[in-house]
Amino acid sequence: MTVESTAARKPRRSAGGKAGTTGSKRSTTGTKSTTRTATGKARGTETELVQLLTPEGERVKNAEFDPYVAGITDDELRGLYRDMVLTRRFDAEATALQRQGELGLWASLLGQEAAQIGSGRATREDDYVFPTYREHGVAWCRGVDPTNLLGMFRGVNNGGWDPNSNNFHLYTIVIGSQALHATGYAMGVAKDGADSAVIAYFGDGASSQGDVAEAFTFSAVYNAPVVFFCQNNQWAISEPTEKQTRVPLYQRAQGYGFPGVRVDGNDVLACLAVTKWALERARRGEGPTLVEAFTYRMGAHTTSDDPSRYRGDDERAAWEAKDPIARLRTYIESQTDTNEGFFAELEEESEALGRRVREVVRAMPDPDRFAIFENAYADGHALVDEERAQFAAYQASFADVEEGNQR
Amino acid sequence: MTVESTAARKPRRSAGGKAGTTGSKRSTTGTKSTTRTATGKARGTETELVQLLTPEGERVKNAEFDPYVAGITDDELRGLYRDMVLTRRFDAEATALQRQGELGLWASLLGQEAAQIGSGRATREDDYVFPTYREHGVAWCRGVDPTNLLGMFRGVNNGGWDPNSNNFHLYTIVIGSQALHATGYAMGVAKDGADSAVIAYFGDGASSQGDVAEAFTFSAVYNAPVVFFCQNNQWAISEPTEKQTRVPLYQRAQGYGFPGVRVDGNDVLACLAVTKWALERARRGEGPTLVEAFTYRMGAHTTSDDPSRYRGDDERAAWEAKDPIARLRTYIESQTDTNEGFFAELEEESEALGRRVREVVRAMPDPDRFAIFENAYADGHALVDEERAQFAAYQASFADVEEGNQR
Amino acid sequence: MTAEKMALAKAINESLRTALENDPKVLVMGEDVGKLGGVFRVTDGLQKDFGEGRVIDTPLAESGIVGTAIGLALRGYRPVVEIQFDGFVFPAYDQIVTQLAKMHARSLGKVKLPVVVRIPYGGGIGAVEHHSESPEALFAHVAGLKVVSPSDANDAYWMMQQAIQSDDPVIFFEPKRRYWDKAEVSREAIPDPLHKARVVREGTDLTLVAYGPMVKLCQEVASAAAEEGKSLEVLDLRSVSPLDFDAIQASVEKTRRLVVVHEAPVFFGSGAEIAARITERCFYHLEAPVLRVGGYHAPYPPARLEEDYLPDLDRVLDAVDRSLAY
Amino acid sequence: MTAEKMALAKAINESLRTALENDPKVLVMGEDVGKLGGVFRVTDGLQKDFGEGRVIDTPLAESGIVGTAIGLALRGYRPVVEIQFDGFVFPAYDQIVTQLAKMHARSLGKVKLPVVVRIPYGGGIGAVEHHSESPEALFAHVAGLKVVSPSDANDAYWMMQQAIQSDDPVIFFEPKRRYWDKAEVSREAIPDPLHKARVVREGTDLTLVAYGPMVKLCQEVASAAAEEGKSLEVLDLRSVSPLDFDAIQASVEKTRRLVVVHEAPVFFGSGAEIAARITERCFYHLEAPVLRVGGYHAPYPPARLEEDYLPDLDRVLDAVDRSLAY
Ligand SMILES: Cc1ncc(C[n+]2csc(CCOP(=O)(O)OP(=O)(O)O)c2C)c(N)n1
Ligand SMILES: Cc1ncc(C[n+]2csc(CCOP(=O)(O)OP(=O)(O)O)c2C)c(N)n1
Ligand SMILES: [Mg+2]
Ligand SMILES: [Mg+2]
């Protein structure tokens, strides 16, 4: 299957005048073709995309990846559907809460549910996940209470959950840095002789960061059991993927000596299968894999963003036809024995989730002032103690005044 | 042609116990094979190496790259030979000067003469070169007076030449950082509409730095006219290349969307041809290229290093048989009409160069104390002025004392 | 139209526009600076008018941005690069500290690197982690860099002009919480030199020094103190490297008391350098030790706590009182 | 054998060996730390005895080294990473400042990162550019990090033990020009706490404070001054973050004069923080302003000039004289 790919766009010299070349179109067909490209015989790239479920909800065969979803039950299919629906509902609620001023910011995952639920459900309990700031669906799969994700967006903490409770690391905002943490963690897993795997999430934009490249290098050299899961949602804030690369991102991996695969990021079955495959490779000691989930950021980058400044509605419309939830519903409706009740109940469950999230957020208290000084250090620091004491005395001086006033 | 390659070594989990896999052996044969590798059907890599002159000095045909050295005259061949001999002589003299205490440190290029002279001679006067700290042969080709290179190793400056006199940038010690400068410079060349090209040198170790990866990304995205010339001398101080990558380094390029080629770095003709090809691609607006010159660091990393701690003599011995100078001499002797006089004169020229270098270095004065404050800023800085004045007063106080003592 | 009231962000926008118009070598580079016009709209409309060749959306890699800007400067360009937020400058720190700062000296003066690194900085906007930092001390300690921060729109306009004209690399800290504050910008004024402090309010009892976002606060403090009969002099430093010690000294010799205010943590912050040097210069003039008000030695807190972390009217007044109590 | 005379580098080697023996979670990582034993041989023999799984040669990428060390720490390991030279820590600066320093706080205390970052630092060894820097202030300003520097072999041994045991990240600056200086190392001594300063010479007329490579110099200064009849007290700070202000204050209340000495540039250096805070604490005790001796605000010069750049006996004595002249 060939899909829209950034590789199709021609590179050009930054200044006008020079003609574009076919350089960007070259296929990554190994050493021979490297030399061939050299002499100008570049060919168009056939970008492969792993897809198990078409946008129309039809199941397509894939000899390599079918085995990874072969035994899937109807209940499990409904489970994936439920995960996606509830994640979307949660996400919508958070967006609404931001509009109401309950959150300072929200980074919506709208459109990326399949990539996140598919990959998240592929993980095993003992696996470890390193997210960006947008992996609400993965958090869901890991059993992190969604309301916990909201603390940092409300501004009451910088990450409110215990990463070790669900093997789901804190959200990381500095783009790409978690790829190295994941690699190091995976090196540790291997040292321990465990057969867990690690998965690092990042975006198309992040692929440009040196840290991500270094993570590729370290993971390859140490053969670390890590899966790099790149959600190429085609935008890094306002920049289209062509500002980050001129060939499909999954191809980046082979230059580091491990496989890269592009999967339809709006196809939850394909994401599940490919991620399972990659995690199992890791468990078997076969080292890192790069999975590029080709998807689309349907909404704004965050609630602070205004996409109308940099992209047209047509693009969004085209992707709406590929909606991850719709296609699984079609499939479930046509291929399983699922009655309307399921969908109705799910609707209710969604609303209940929305309500709960709303209530919890509204009740979320501001942290105590002294939290500023807590946890700056694990073993304490003399200056922090001194400043805390000064702060306390300073705060107390107001209390004195207020008391004084009351008297 | 297949050569020793780091790819042949098996990856392993960092901890013992797990079996090695064939992951590292996979061929970079494009998107299809990516998926194939995925299912375990990895195949051995045929690493291609461009070679025009065998270690035995025999010319081999290469349809793609022969044209780039097709018109080469006997004089030019002797010129390349002379460049390599004089560079080696200079290098040996510098090493000797370090032993005598005239230099604080020296980074020898022994063994890498062909990679440097071949690539250096491929550049045009208006091209721009960004070296590491070891490109004495390239500096020679660019017309930089070799004695100028010694200032920083003697400790009288941190880079003693005007980069714009020979379009040869200062030596850069922070590994990999110059790859970005070269890319930016090349972006500027393109903006200017010039058809110059830029070449960035770096080592196998440097390939792991995030900056080099970012340079690949930027150069690809902006289609910058830059050639990345990686001298894989197989060691980064004490670390063999397998500590940096598990596939041949030239393959790194294709994941970024531009061609990579491995050339025999001890074959001056091949280095000349491949670099010319890459520079011409750049000039034509076809963007970046990665050239990996597969060579060997015959000596220590620097005069501070002791390679006996980490590598055996056998390796070195094997590479002595591939000496870049010897093979060109054999070729010249067998294929051109070159008499003994040429070699004898060159011998004399070499000795004269050695003498001159020795004399210049020994006469190189220490910089004036006040040079500390010079050039910290282009437009001046109040604090620097203040500190300079204090320093002057402080120095003068000794003069006073000394004068006082004299009286 | 010689003077116009405009927001600080708009003043920088206008200044960049002027520079792009006047000098074909000036470039604007960064993440999202093109169509989007930057997350704060500071580069709004520039790409439309000057093209993608001069207003350049870059890959998401700060080291790459600064590293290629260095290369462009070597080629004769004058890049103005944007770091999207204060907390994201660190991937570029190596290029800034080991290359940008040192290349002029390394080349014995042969090479000049007129690169401006724009960094929206500071807190007070209720942002998530890494979006409210004040890392200026980490640049001021590094020789070869100049570090400035305007406090109002007119300075923002002119200091950007001067920073771009400077042949030295300039780290240009933009007080993001003041982006929307308006002031008169005069295009015909003769601007103060880039590295000179300015007395923004005269006083006799104590000197307050600040730069960037804290200048406005210090002016408010001075007004509040005035109501209590205390006459505070307020200095806008404008430049953190070099620091205008002469101006501070002149003020302190008059007022004999000094309080330094910045958002950055006090520990190893600008206030330390100012206190140390002014104490040395004014040892016999000072009636009280130089006091410092700034952030605590703890990671910048979540937004709901930033009011307690950041210097505010009461905390500065508290320091003023403590100083006057000596 | 309870006490043994050994070089500072060897003491660190022994300390790492002890840690590797005592705790299977301790790892040593860095460029060339394996077979080569590091460019200064500080890790000599460790890989041979503990294997490639515990003494790890890394790819040449400092951000990667620190970033993967963070991941390993998250998995329960205690990595001790080596940065080959002071000037090469900057590619890792982002990971250190935004991740290593903050993750404990970010996780509300759930996550601990017991990572030690070893950095051979300082000048005086005639090296080329980037091999003689003293960037400690750039780490001390960052909350979440601890910064220490031993001055002799015994401290080097014990402080490394304590740094590895610390649940906080510790930036461990090793005074490379003292690597070959020998001192008695007692394996049974009860070490001083990691962040406490130590009086290494008592005196009454003036306090000299220093850390790392400058402690020895200050002792020499005190000896020279003693010959002129001046009694100097010398404090080895040992820790730059936290700074032991109590110890400095106690000394200054006695001597009433303070000179701070470090190799790093004076501007925004440790001396600034010490001067500012001690002046505040000892305002009525100080007979002279706190004076600072350190590097100039210029890139570290080429080796042939470093003697003029670095504090030496005469320059410190000059500052002592100036202080005493007040
Ligand atoms: C080092 C760094 N630079 C800049 C930013 C600001 N920033 C936040 S998200 C973002 C775009 C990320 O794009 P991508 O990696 O594609 O992820 P997406 O947001 O699309 O999920 C940018 C530039 C940051 N967080 N970190
Ligand atoms: C950022 C950085 N880290 C570490 C070093 C120390 N160092 C100098 S040369 C070197 C090895 C470089 O190996 P390679 O890139 O293969 O180049 P070669 O020396 O073999 O020519 C190292 C680690 C450095 N100069 N810069
Ligand atoms: Mg994206
Ligand atoms: Mg090498």
Image: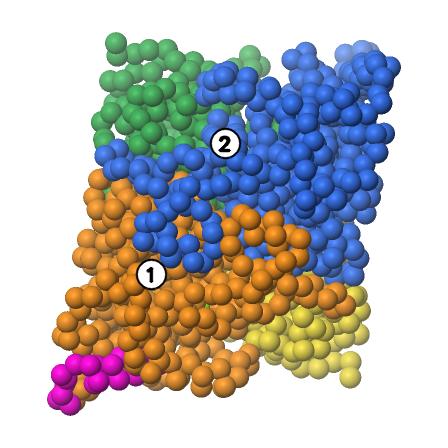
Chain colours: A orange, B blue, C yellow, D green
Magenta-highlighted residues? A323-342
Give the foreground label among 2 and 1: 2
Give whichever of B300, D235 is nearer the camera. Answer: B300
Residue A332 inside the magenta-drawn segment: yes
Numbered circle sitting on residue A131: 1
Q: Would residue D100 appear left or right of A67 to someone viewing this image?
A: right
Residue identifier under label 2? B4
What is the quadrant of the N terminus of chain B in the image? top right
Give whichever of C252, B138 is nearer the camera. Answer: B138
Question: Please, which chain is the residue tagged with disc 1 on?
Answer: A
Check disc 2 and report its element: helix, strand or loop.
Answer: loop
Q: Would residue C23 appear left or right of A297 to someone viewing this image?
A: right
**Which quadrant would residue B51 be assigned to in this image?**
top right
- Across and down, in percent, residue A48 comes to 43, 65
Residue at 44% of width from left, 86% of height from top?
A317
- Across and down, in percent, residue A370 comes to 29, 59
